[in-house]
Structure formats: structure tokens, C-alpha cells
Amino acid sequence: MSAAVSIAGLVKSFGGFRALDGLDLDVREGEVHGFLGPNGAGKSTTLRILLGLLRADSGRVEILGGDPWRDVVPLHRRIAYVPGDVSLWPSLTGGEAIDLLGRLRGGLDRKLRAELLEAFELDPSKRGHAYSKGNRQKVAIVAALSSNAELLILDEPTAGLDPLMEAIFREEIRRQRARGRSVLLSSHILAEVEALSDRISIIRRGKVVETASLEQMRRHVRTNVTATLSDGAAPLGGLPSVDDLRIEGRRVRFSVDDGSLAAAMGALALHGLSALTVTPPSLEDLFLQHYGERLHPEDADDAEGRRPE
Amino acid sequence: MSRIQVSGTRLAGTGFTGTGFTGTLPLLRHAIRLDRWKLLPWLLIFGAIPAATYAAYGSIFTSPAEAMLLQATLSTNPAFTLLFGPAAELTTAIGFVTWRVQMFSMFFVALMAVYAVTRHTRAAEDSGQAELVDSGVVGQHARLASAVLLAWLASAAVGLLVGGTLASAGAPPSGAFALGALLAGMGVAFAGVAAVTAQLGSAARTANTLAVSVLGISYLLRGLGDTLADAGWLLWTNPMGWAERIRPATDNNFWPLALLAAAGALLTVVAAWLRSRRDFGLGFIPGRPGPAQGRAGIWGLTSRLDRGAFWTWGVSLVALGSVYGLVTSTMATIFADNPFIKQMIAFRVATEEQLLMAFVGVLLLVLTLISGAFGIHLALHFYAEEEERRAEWVLSAPLSRLGYFTPTVVLAILAPAVGLMAGALALAAGAKATGSAADTGTVLLQALAQLPALWLATAVALALVGLAPRLGGLAWLLLVYWLLLTMFGPVLKLPDWLLNTSPFHVVPNVSAPDADWSPVWWTLAIAAVLLVSALAGYRRRDLVCT
């Protein structure tokens, strides 16, 4: 399979700050690739280099077989982009903004445009300043999805969308994949990336620390379980791969990896399970478990004590 | 606080309630904290400039006769009266300071007050900040009251600073504080204007534009009141005219201050009444829905985004040009009355036409500076698209950097030039209509000669956008420097080499027989070089991503 995006050893500094520090990334043609990392890790900078908005300091960057800085116009005919935190022109309507982007790329699919407007329940006749954050996001999403581009670059596209709209968004992305489009989807929410992606790359401090398929990634992540048992505390300590077990009266909390989840549920059921909360691991958990490090620098002191040897 | 509540119960019928102001003081404290770095520079500049001018007086004039001569020159040239107000008393330092700073400072104090009020009312509603605050324990009038109080406090601080620094520099306290009162009064009145416009417009930009239009109209009315015969009553029609009536250094007449304060308070009450009759986030001038589809490409987008600016600046230039044209007719009377000028003409030192054109040149200079500001505005507006992250989205389409920048460059070169020529034409037409001897062709030729200076100002801004966008504001500083140098430099007898650093100063008087056009070509060449570097720079640089 050929590559939609191929980056090796990418470096980009802003003043003294090294935003990207030897980043490698490969997006295969036809796949949805999750680009996962905390805020400030360098996701948007990477995407902006791929769009030729920023110039790489060093490293090799190829997108759809071209140089993103040199071949802007021919490449952009084949790429659509949803920026993170979309800003619209206050005096232009959403429909005018969609058509502006469409016209700049030489036309868009009118039928698809109409369908998407309906699916996302977006009123295209409102002025830019009258849209909420979620609706501004939808304008950019409709503009990108109705473009027939081969590669979609989406920077935290669902920020501000309500859960219903998020579901519709996921459905549309799956449709795009079914048509053979490639998608690079950046996010700091694990669940979103998990729901859509074939493969995931995790970026941390300007470097991709891991690229793996979802199954491979799952092995790293642990699910948090909180249960209330009518029989009192259950002897869960003996179960394999149960960790962080805490017992507070009749409530137990623990984390468990995907492989042992079924066994743990069985054990809970035997002891009169009366309430259950299962929380999928957040990116925060993943980083804590996998890298022994907190995402926020203010917690750094705390993290030092937990760093595994 | 308690005083406000007592009056509040009395005014219950007009929408005030006893608890309407709850939270005003915490909001005010919050606003002061947010704005301290925005307001401090204004305050420091206002504090420093009058006192510095006062201190410089002794070195500007070596003898009282020189000051008298300047006063005679200025008061016989209505162009200067129109622009800076009457030069009533230049033989005292405080009188000179008043003439130098009053018109500009009035303008800027009013802008400070307008922006502060809009920022904490309409702009906060636009951004959603207000929603967060208003959901707390906050009365319905608290936000408006705190915004207006902030502007009033800042205006009062300007007044006290100006009065205090001048008095401590040795000026007579009555004159010093009269000038302070004039400025504070303007701020107070225009805070009221902005409070009302913030209720009318449904976006911060509309609110600001409306308030600044009131300021511009005030400036024009007061200018006409000062210059036209039998038009003194025009000074009573607007806040700027009232403020001018204080006449620091001559009359020191404080009671117009009461008029300004009353206007500020009354307008604020009207604003509160309007506020209680509209929905959150909406204005009385409703935001209408628009077309669900569009046909604009990048040229269409650029002209669409700058259309409002084009009409605003264009109409201002034509209006100002017409007013200047009307004033030109008074020159004939002045030539006839002034023995000195009669002598100059008699001895063929200058022809009447040359003197007239020198005067028209000053007026055209103002139009050119305003057009230059328009050009800078267009250039920096392009960069604002980048700062607000819309450029990023547009450039993700198949559009080269040059393809994106070129429409703005073309527009920034053409639109201010069209504005200037339209203003010049209006000036010539106004002059003709009132029987002035100014020749339309010569006026237009003079305006043409000034075009390169305007383009240089625009090209500097474009080059900054292309090469170092974060420094874009320097273009404004440079324009203000050129403005001060060209307007006041000759009066202050600055050396030629310094005056010649302004492209507006080196423009020749086209009616003079020995008019030297070479500076015009030089200015044009420098502007062209800057334009090329603007385009090259924008093609090569990183987009500014916030």
C-alpha cells in the first residue's frame, strides 16, 4: 500500500521552542489514521506543515507524493482541511463560506453539500458571528466533506459538537473511508480516535512515540471499574491483571486490561453486583500507565514519584 | 453603591430596580484588572505630551514676537482652525499647549472611552464572556454600569493627569485644569455615546463604528462652527463643540463640563433603558440572515471584506473634502484683509494662486494622510484574517500565497487612491460652488502629486505584513510620525533633513513655477520596492498561527 502521508525526522522550532523534534508519521492510502496527543504536543504544527502553511526546518515530508511547501496548488486540489477551532467571517453566511472554499477548489458536490447540511442540521443562511462554536465547526466539516478530496486532514474536528452530532460525524467519516479516502484525524480524546481509526500514532513532545493498530494499542490501555457489591468486598485480588485495587466498604475500584475484563465481571457478578461503572481509559490514563507521566506540567512533581524504573 | 440604589428605587419606572446594580463594583474591579495594560499607555501618553509641550515652549519661541507671528499665520488660515481648533492664545505656554494638543487629545480620549465601553459590553456579549459573568450574582444593569464607570474613571484620570502635570510644570492651575476638564468631559460624554451604540449594534464592530461616526460628525460640525462666518451656533450642536467652549488658557470657562457630564449620564440612562428592552446578544439593528449560497472567489472575498471600510473611508474623505472646499472660499476675504499677504502679492513674492494652492495643499495633505490610514487599515485587515485563523482555512484550498495576497495588495493600492481623488474632487467642486478661485485641474494635479506619499504609507504596512507581521502596528507609528512632522515640523522650524524624512513634506506645490517633481518619483520608487518585498516575503514566510 502506498503512503498518503510520509514524514521522517521532521523538526520545527518557533524561536527557542522546539515544537517538533524528529517526528515520523506514515498514513497509508485509504486508512483513517488517528493522531493522538495532549494539547501542545505538536499535532496542529504537524498538520500545518502538511498543508504548506508552515515550512519545515529539517526532515523529509511528503504528502500524496508531493512536497507540501512547493506543490501547494496541485496538492491542495486533492486535500481538504478542517482547522481546529474554526473561525468564520462575521459578515458572511455559513453557506457563503462553504461555497467560497468550494469555489477556490474548483467546485464542490452540490448534492453532497445539501445532504450534509441536512444531516448536521446546519442553517447555512446565518451570519458567521451568529454561529455557536459547534456550528462553526460544522461549517468547516461540511465544506471539507463535500469537496471530493482524496485526503482529509482534520484537526480536532468534533470540538464543540454535541454527542448526537459527533455520532453523525463518525458515520460520515466511515462513509469517506468506504469511498477509499484517506483521513488524518488529530485529537486529544482517545475515545474519538478509537471509534474511527485503523491505526493510531501517539505524539508526545514533538515526537511520535508509538504507531500501532487499535488492537495493539488496546493492550496498553486499562479500563477503570467501580462497582458496588451487596456481599461486601469481593476477593478480587486474586484475579490476573487487576490493578490499583481499592476497597471502600461495599465499593470496589480497580483497573483491568481488556483481556481480563470478562473474568473480572464474572467475579463481580458472583458477589451480588448492584451498581457498576466502567470507564474507558482516557488519554490521561494511557499516558500515566504507559509513560508514567502526567500530561500537565503542573502535576510533574507528582509524576516523578510514579515513574516506573 | 448605596447612593446608586437609593436613586435606583426612585427610577424604578424606567427599568431601574433596587438590585439592578448588584455586582457593579466587583465587575468594575475585574474590568480594571483586565484593562490596566490597555489603559495605562493612554494615560501615560496623555500625562506626558502636554507637560512635554509645555516644557518645550521656551525653546520653540525665542521671543514673544515669534509667537505672535505664528498666531497671526495660524488664525488667518482657516485650514488650521478647521483641523486643530482656533489658535486663540499662543503667547503663553499654556495657550500654546492647548492649541497643540486639544483636538488630537479630544479625539483620542473619546476613542479610549468608546473602546473601553464597547469592550466590556458588546464585545463581551459577542465572545460569550458576558454570559458566564451574567449568570452569576449580577444585576441587569451591572455590566453596563461597570463599563461606563471604567470609562469615566479613565477619563477623569486623564483630566487630572493633564491638569496635574501641567500645573506642576508651572502652568497656571486654572488653565491647566481647564484643559484637563475639556479632555475628561469628552471621555465622559463619549462613554455615554458608546453605551447607547453598544445597545444598537448587534456586534462590537457595528457599535464602535456608530460611536466613532458620532465623533467624526462632531469633529466636522465643530470645525465648520469655528471657520465659517456666522456658524458659531454649530459649536452647540455636539460634544466636541461644548468641550471647545471651555477655552482653556483664555476663558477657563468650566460650565460646559457640566453639560458634557450631563450628556454622558443621560445617554447612559437611555442605554440602560434600551438594554432592558432587548435580548442578550442581540441589538436594535438586527443581524439579518443572508444568502445560503455564495459565488465569491478570492477577489470576491477580499472586496466583500473591505467593502464596509471602502464606503466608510470613502464617504469620510468626500465629506471632509466638501467641507474643505467650502472653507476655501473664505481665503479670498483673508487675502483682501491681510496687508502682509497683499504686500507679498504686490511685490510678486507669490501669486494669489500660489498662496491659495499652498493653503489647499494643507487641506489635501490631511486628505492624503487619512487615505494613508485607510491603506494601512486595509493591509493590516489582511493580517487580522491570519490572526483570527481564517487565512489558515482559506490557504488550505488550492490557492497560492501570491494568489491570496494579491487582491489585498491591489485593493490597498487602488481604493485609498480613489478615495483621495474623490475627496480632492469634492474639495475642488465645493470651492468652485462657493466662488473660490481654486482651479479644479490644479487641485487634482496637487492630489496626484501626493498619491505616491499615500502609497508609501500603504506599502510600508504591506511590507510589514509580508515580512514581519507582528510588527504591523509600526506602520501606524510611522504615519503618526509623518503626520506630526509634516503638520508641526515647519511651524517648529525643524531642520530640513528631518522634515525631508516625511514623504508628505517633500510633495511640491504644483502651481509653483519651479515645482520639483523628483521627490515624487523617489517616493514612488521606494513604495514599489516595498511592494515587491511584501509579496516576496509573504510567499516565503510561515503563516502566523495562534
Image: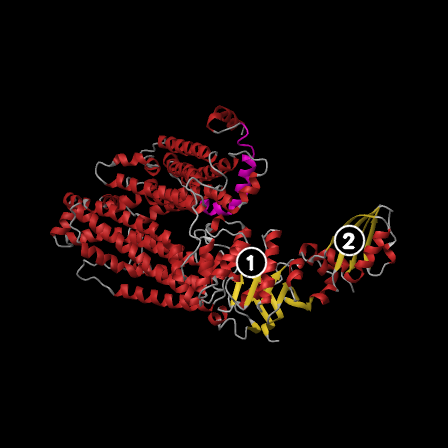
Q: Chain of mark 2?
A: A
Measuring from the top left, give residue B401's x and y in whole percent: 44, 67
Which residue: 49% across, 26% down? B12
Q: Tell me, yes or no, whether the highlighted magenta stretch contains residue B36.
A: yes
Measuring from the top left, give residue B155's x and y in whole percent: 44, 39
Q: Are marks 2 and 1 in contact (CB under 8 Å)?
A: no
Crowding at mark 2 (Cα within 10 Å: few <14, some 14-19, many 20+): some
Q: Residue furthest top?
A: B10
What range is drawn magenta here? B18-44
Amino acid type indicated by mark 2: Val
Measuring from the top left, give residue B389's x and y in whole percent: 50, 58
Residue B377 visible here: no
Q: Nearer the viewer, residue B81 or B367?
A: B367
Q: Nearer the viewer, residue A138 or A114?
A: A114
Element assignment for label 1: loop
Residue B436 visible here: yes
Vertical order, B257 against A154 (above or below): above
Q: Tell me, yes or no, whether the highlighted magenta stretch contains residue B110.
A: no
Residue B106, image quadrant: top left
In this picture, residue A197 sits left or right of residue A71? right
In this picture, residue A260 sits left or right of residue B387? right
Q: Which mark is residue A225?
A: 2
Q: Which mark is residue A84?
A: 1
Q: Is most of the magenta stretch helix, strand or loop?
A: helix
Measuring from the top left, give residue A229's x and y in whole percent: 83, 47
Residue A305, image quadrant: bottom right
Vertical order, B490 against B298 (above or below): above
Amino acid type indicated by mark 1: Gly
Q: Nearer the viewer, residue B1 or A186?
A: A186
In this picture, residue B475 sits left or right of residue A241? left
